[in-house]
Image: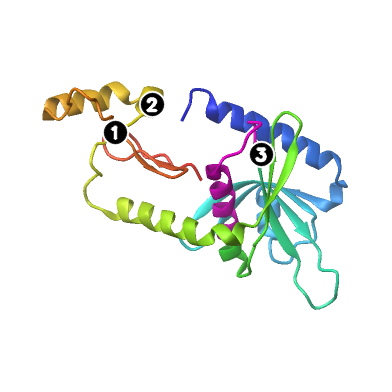
Amino acid sequence: MPPGYELKTTSSASKGQKRLVAGVAPDKRAIGTQAMGSLKPAQWRLGIGCAVQSQNLECSCHAVERIPSPSRGRTAQFVPIRFVFRNKLNRDDKLLLAFDARVLSEALSREAGLGKIVYGENYATLKVKTSALASDVRKLTDKIGTLLASPSPPDLVLNRHCAECEFQNRCRQKEIEKDDLDSTIKCRGLAHVRGLMIVVGVCQFEQML
């Protein structure tokens, strides 16, 4: 994770949330646990800072938009929203949104097949068909589950991200002690699974979800 990434993400989400809130009446918005406490019978149109939990997964949605059904007898649609400070999106941004959608779907027992990413300094909006990424997200979370269930940490694997990691020196020393550090320095130290970063063992566990 590049230096300052988390701070920039938090700042972007905070500013984006304020923009969304400004356009919604006070009685049509809910904050944090207030939104999740009334998720299924919800009457709000916008949920902010929603911690959503299913049986085995949990995510923190920057925002959730509730779109009422146009006809009686049909359920409302819940759309997760993520804010990205960068002006250019990548696949990982979409996978993180799709993860939010998966957890939301399981919590609601209904599909959340669409999400939105608000990104860049001009707050451009991209609609993402999260249902198309559901299979990829499931495979990644299964891999993470396997790693966490293992009684031993994964192999220490130095990679190109090591220069940005606060545990770089510790991992390097471990490799030297094992006499596994070769001249090509194939950076061994992080288990990185396409947008879902896990640091396990001598480092620390951190989940970008």
* Separation of marks 2 and 1 at Cα, in angstroms: 9 Å
User: Which mark identifies residue 104?
Assistant: none
**Residue 104 seen:** no
Tell whether position 100 is magenta.
yes
Q: Is mark 2 on a helix, strand or loop?
A: loop
Q: Tag 1: Cα neighbours inside 10 Å, few (<14), some, or many (≥20)? A: many
Q: Tag 2: Cα neighbours inside 10 Å, few (<14), some, or many (≥20)? A: some
Q: Identify the main secondary structure in magenta.
A: helix
Q: What stretch is highlighted in magenta?
A: 84-103
Mark 2 and mark 1 lie on one chain; the one further toward the N terminus is 2
Mark 3 and mark 1 lie on one chain; the one further toward the N terminus is 3
Left-right relation of 97 to 178: right
* x, y percent for residue 177: 13, 26
Q: From what the image shows, is residue 153 above or below residue 11?
A: below
Residue type at tag 2: Cys
Could you tell me if the residues under marks 3 and 1 are in contact, i.e. CB atoms within 8 Å?
Answer: no
Q: From what the image shows, is residue 159 above or below residue 114?
A: above
* x, y percent for residue 2: 48, 26
Residue type at tag 3: Phe
Q: Tag 3: Cα neighbours inside 10 Å, few (<14), some, or many (≥20)? A: many
The answer to which image quadrant residue 141 occupies is: bottom left
* x, y percent for residue 102: 56, 59
* Residue identifier under label 1: 189
Mark 3 and mark 2 lie on one chain; the one further toward the N terminus is 3
Could you tell me if the residues under marks 2 and 1 are in contact, i.e. CB atoms within 8 Å?
Answer: yes
Q: What element carries label 1?
A: loop
* Residue identifier under label 2: 165
* Separation of marks 3 and 1 at Cα, in angstroms: 29 Å
Give the residue at x 64% y 62%. 113
Of residues 67 and 28, which is closer to you in this image? Answer: 67
* Residue identifier under label 3: 83
Give the residue at x 54% y 28%. 5
